[in-house]
Every structure is written in C-alpha cells, then in structure tokens.
Image: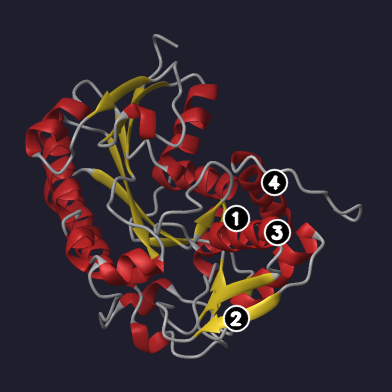
Amino acid sequence: MSESKLIVVCGGGGFIGGHLVKDLLSKGHRVRCVDKKPQSNWYQRSEFAENLVLDLEKKEACYQALQGADEVFNLAADMGGMGFIENNKALCMLSVLINTHLLQAAKDIGISRFFYASSACVYAADKQTTPENPGLKESDAYPALPEDGYGWEKLFSERMCRHFREDFGIEARVARYHNVYGPNGTYKGGREKAPAAVCRKVIEAQVSGSNEIEIWGDGEQTRSFMYIDDCVKGTQDILASDILEPINLGSAEMVTINQLVDIVEEIAGVKLKRKYILDAPKGVRGRSSDNTLINELMDWEPSIKLLDGMRKTYEWIKSDMGVELPTPASV
C-alpha cells in the first residue's frame, strides 16, 4: 500500500464519500479523507485512511488537503434533500468556493486527475414538467434553467472544471448524480432524501401505531434512485475514463413517490394511510436519467434494482434507529 497512489476524497465524511473511501482502501490505495464536520459526526470513519478535518471553503485548507496527492474526488458540498435545497439557496451557492479553491490547488500542485460530483439539479426545469419524463439527456442542461441555488452552483462548477481542463490541462471528469441512496446515510434532520425519508416514516408509523405516512406533494412526481454501490463504481470508472463532458450517473428505473412508498410498504409488510402535504417542497414534476451515453461510452450503467437496494436501506435504518420489527417472510 505504501507504493500506491494517494487519493484524496473531499467530503469523505459524508454519505457517498464514506462508501468511496472504504472501497478505495479495499483496493489497496492510500486515502486521505477530508471533511469539515468533526470526525465524530462523519457518516463512516475508516481508521486506515488519513482523516483530516478542514474547511474546504478556505483556499489554504484546499492546498493542505491536496499536498502530495495523485487524484482527487470532490464530493464536498453543503446540500441535502429537496426541503434543504429549497430553503437554503445561499448556503448551497457557497459550495462554489470549495470547487474553485480545489481546482486552483490541483493546478498548482500538479494533480493528475480531478473528479467533480455534479447533480441532476443542473437540468433545465422546462424539461421536467411532467411525470412522464423520458429521461434527461446530457444536452438537456442547456439552455440553462437549473434548480435555483444548488443547481446553478453545480452548473457553474461544471464549467470551471471544463475550463481548467482546457486552459491548464487538468484531467477533470464530471458526473451528474441522480438521487443516491443506501445504508449509512442521512434519514432524519431535514437533509435526508426521499428513499431514506420514506423508510424512516414507515418505521415510525409502525412503532407509533399511527399507520399513517405523510407524503410531500401528491406522490405522482417521478424520480430515479441509484444505489450507493452503483454510484461508487461509476464514480471511479468515470474518473479513469476519457469522457471529457459531464455524464449522467443514475438509474434509469423511474418510479413515482407513491410507488416508492409501495416498495417500502412491501418490504415492511404493512399498508399505511397516506396523508398528502401539497404545499411541501417537492421539486420538479418528473426526473430520471437517460443512460444512452454512459452505455455507449462505458458499456455499463447503474443496474441495482430499487427493490433490492431499498431492502438493504430499510434494514440499516431500522437497525440504526434501534427498532425491532418483524421482517415479512416474503422479504
């Protein structure tokens, strides 16, 4: 391991970052894990990584984080689910400082490869107005009309990566994540995304005996959800590739939020009364990933079925909540 390359995972204390660090370590790489949060608040902490607490919005911290590194994964951002994104636009925009300073440090230090985690929130809103979304193609990001705040920051940072590659020769790669979920993620507190939130709500309904679940919107809005293992594989493969333009990294299995609730109810062996909160944050009407390009260029796409991934996610959340509930025989 001492002779392997040093890889820096920025945002390594987060959900995706924690899984990525573990996978890189399992492959024999030396890993430096960097996050702003105290290590006690990291989603996962790998003792075999070099773990640093640094505020990457500060330029000097970025230079410290990248010293001696060969490759960088930038997953660091102030973000969360739709409730957080819609109510914290300024905080989301400030993440532009992270990618800007990391790119500057990468240029000056001589980093060979740089990965930037973008988002499906960069896509134009007028392409996502109906639940029957045919899948967002990479070209649908322009003319630009991204999610206000978070989406604009991601789109701008994508352009930064492009121009640092063109002007300074940094081998920058960009993936547009579509709704990543899985164990060891946020499921409460306001930053959680729909898969984890639905799991928590179903568990809470069983524990309380209310047999009711709140759903934001009418439940007919559509999304695709990518399991964390597919995300970790795709992230590394995209960095190692020759793909210069931003590319989708997401599942093409589109479901309504009502169908997502159906899946978790099936896993839990319950049927709940649904209470729709029509004025809650709910995002665009329809969004899913068109995987034509990733199939063409990588002969691969995220393929873990939503039911399979949600089973693992539900069981982890139930365990982390300290709840003992019967598991249906069918599961």
Q: Residues within 10 Å of mark 3 (few under 14, many from 20)?
A: some
Q: Which residue: 29% across, 45% down?
A: 76
Determine which residue is flagged by label 2: 275
- Percent coordinates x, y for residue 323 in the rendering: 68, 44
Determine which residue is flagged by label 1: 299
Q: Amino acid at mark 4?
A: Glu
Viewer-side residue, 276 vs 293: 276
Q: Secondary structure at mark 1?
A: loop
Which of disc 4 and disc 1 is earlier in sequence?
Answer: 1
Viewer-side residue, 311 vs 123: 311
Q: Secondary structure at mark 3?
A: loop
Contact flag, marks 3 and 1 (Cβ < 8 Å): no
Which image quadrant is residue 321 in?
A: top right
Q: Amino acid at mark 3?
A: Lys
- Tell me the mark number nearer the camera, choosing from 4 and 2: 2
Q: Which residue: 32% across, 66% down?
A: 85
- Tell me the mark number nearer the camera, choosing from 4 and 3: 4
**What mark, if any, has residue 305 been given in the picture?**
3
**Spatial separation of the CA atoms under disc 3 and disc 2:** 27 Å
**Spatial separation of the CA atoms under disc 4 and disc 2:** 24 Å
Q: Is residue 129 visible?
A: yes
Which of disc 3 and disc 4 is earlier in sequence?
Answer: 3
Q: Residues within 10 Å of mark 1 (few under 14, many from 20)?
A: few
**Spatial separation of the CA atoms under disc 2 and disc 1:** 42 Å
Q: Secondary structure at mark 4?
A: helix
Determine which residue is flagged by label 4: 315
**Spatial separation of the CA atoms under disc 3 and disc 1:** 18 Å
Q: Amino acid at mark 1?
A: Asp
**What mark, if any, has residue 96 been given in the picture?**
none
